Image: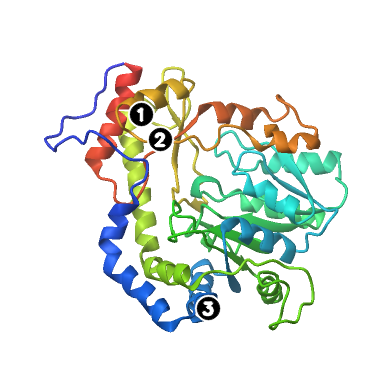
């Protein structure tokens, strides 16, 4: 297959990183250092005014009633689950095609993860399968559904909310990759009872270490999460329940507050890069014009639901020759990643759930085909062209 990309006179980059945080830092260096110095001068390093201010700002961004800063995205999911009413002995439905924390947080809450297959287009939790499962098997002590907004695209919250209402279940959003995403104009983090976000350094809004935040549409749940993150304590040295040390560092909050005003424009840059990838891949004859599967098109982007606003934490393609393509790109200094190479139901630690290969075929096939291409706001069009040109060369 010959590439039909138009010629460009701009210098062609030789390597393209999957992510380059230095570029973002260069533009924010003075603001970030001033924010860190402000915390050091205050000598208040855990929770405090910086965290409280960030909580207000994230609540405003997402449309949630409350936000609770914590130590990591994993911690945020645990807080969200427990505050939503998940308790030991319960079951929680979630996607098998996600990062480990989506299911491990359920286990930490004392519940059993019920791992289910995903939609073949978006790779988000398949609401139709969830409904079918509940109609045929009520599942003992089922208390919640935990949909994952995979790669920055909200799951089908219309269908999932209908299921939750019908079966009296809470919805806990795994919004770790979806800060700034929305569904029908409502922000991720305000679509369920509670939600968890990650600020891991690779995320769209990233800390300079581990950090996360849990949001809720219920102010009482917000107060509960505040106690849980601080050893179950409403005030110092008095403990009403078993919580955990899940507090957020003030330095991380200060860094995140510097970055937060830029997150919407960074997300828009990601959407523009995704549109450029779509165009270049189509011009190169690598995908069909409809971005759907084709017998003659070796690359398939994931489907996008027009009811939501995607923030493209990752730009992911599917290809049957994924591993060979990845090596080809790596040899030419183009960064890629596989999110995720093994579905959760096939992870050894979840063998006790009794699922085996072949039980969740869509997730299993996706794990063999997905490949994340370079995606961050500061990418240039010559870099995007370089990536697509090399993919075209591989398939020629």
Q: Position of residue 219 (x, y in %)?
A: 67, 76
Secondary structure found at label 2: loop
Which of 302 and 17 lies nearest the eye of the viewer? 17
Residue depicted at 52% across the width and 76% down the height:
56
Badge 3 element: helix
Residue in the picture at 88% in, 48% down: 140
Q: Is residue 199 above or below residue 362?
A: below
- Residue at x-position 43% and y-position 32%: 291
Q: Which residue is mark 3?
A: 52
Mark 2 and mark 1 residues within 8 Å of each other at the beta carbon: yes
Q: Position of residue 220 (x, y in %)?
A: 71, 76
Residue 278 placement: quadrant: top left
**Residue 125 image-quadrant placement:** top right
Q: Nearer the viewer, residue 252 or 314?
A: 252
Residue furthest to the left: 9
Q: Residues within 10 Å of mark 1 (few under 14, many from 20)?
A: some
How far apart in space, not on screen, are marks 3 and 2 (Cα)? Answer: 37 Å
**Dot 3, how many residues are within 10 Å of its Cα: few (below 14), some (14-19), or many (20+)?**
some
Residue 141 appears left or right of 348: right
Measuring from the top left, give residue 352's x and y in whole percent: 80, 36
Taking depth in this image into account, of 293 and 233 the one nearest to the observer is 233
Question: Considering the image in quadrants, where does the C terminus appear?
Answer: top left
Answer yes or no: is residue 284 visible. no
Q: Which mark is residue 388?
A: none
Q: Say whether residue 125 is left or right of residue 272.
A: right
Instruction: Please provide percent x and percent y for residue 274.
Output: 37, 43
Residue on which disc 1 sits: 330
Residue 388 vs 243, above or below: the answer is above
**Whole-number angstrom distance, CA of label 3 to CA of label 1:** 43 Å
Q: Please determine whether, in this image, residue 322 is positioned above or below residue 158.
A: above
- Residue marked by disc 2: 336
Identify the mark nearer the N-term, 3 or 2. 3
């Amino acid at each position: 297959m010959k590439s039909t990309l138009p010629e460009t006179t701009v210098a062609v980059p030789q390597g393209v990183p999957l992510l380059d945080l230095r570029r973002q830092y260069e533009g924010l260096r003075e603001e970030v250092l001033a924010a860190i110095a402000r915390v050091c001068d205050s000598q208040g390093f855990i929770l405090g005014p910086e965290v409280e201010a960030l909580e207000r700002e994230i609540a405003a961004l997402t449309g949630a009633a409350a936000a609770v800063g914590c130590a990591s995205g994993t911690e945020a999911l645990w807080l969200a689950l427990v505050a939503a009413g998940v308790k030991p002995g319960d079951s929680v439905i979630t996607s098998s095609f996600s990062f480990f924390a989506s299911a491990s947080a359920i286990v930490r809450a004392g519940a059993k993860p019920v791992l289910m297959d995903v939609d073949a287009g978006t790779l988000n939790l398949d609401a139709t399968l969830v409904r079918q499962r509940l109609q045929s098997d009520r599942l003992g002590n089922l208390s919640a559904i935990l949909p994952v907004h995979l790669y920055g695209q909200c799951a089908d919250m219309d269908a999932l909310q209908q299921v939750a209402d019908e079966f009296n279940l809470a919805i806990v959003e795994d919004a770790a990759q979806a800060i700034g995403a929305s569904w029908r104009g409502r922000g991720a983090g305000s679509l369920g009872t509670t939600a968890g976000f990650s600020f891991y350094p690779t995320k769209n809004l990233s800390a300079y270490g581990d950090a996360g935040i849990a949001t809720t549409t219920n102010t009482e749940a917000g107060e509960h999460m505040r106690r849980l993150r601080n050893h179950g304590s409403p005030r110092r040295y008095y403990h009403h329940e078993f919580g955990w040390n899940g507090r957020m560092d003030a330095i991380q909050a200060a860094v995140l507050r510097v970055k937060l005003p830029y997150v919407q424009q960074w997300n828009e840059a990601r959407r523009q890069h995704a549109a450029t990838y779509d165009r270049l891949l189509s011009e190169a004859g690598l995908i069909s014009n409809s971005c759907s599967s084709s017998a003659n098109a070796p690359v398939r982007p994931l489907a996008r639901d027009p009811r939501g606003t995607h923030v493209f934490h990752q730009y992911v393609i599917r290809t049957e020759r994924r591993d060979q393509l990845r090596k080809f790109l790596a040899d030419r200094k183009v960064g890629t990643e596989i999110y995720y190479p093994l579905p959760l139901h096939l992870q050894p630690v979840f063998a006790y759930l009794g699922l085996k290969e072949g039980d969740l075929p869509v997730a299993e096939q996706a794990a063999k085909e997905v490949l994340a291409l370079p995606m961050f706001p500061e990418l240039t069009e010559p870099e995007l062209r370089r990536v697509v040109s090399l993919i075209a060369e591989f398939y020629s």
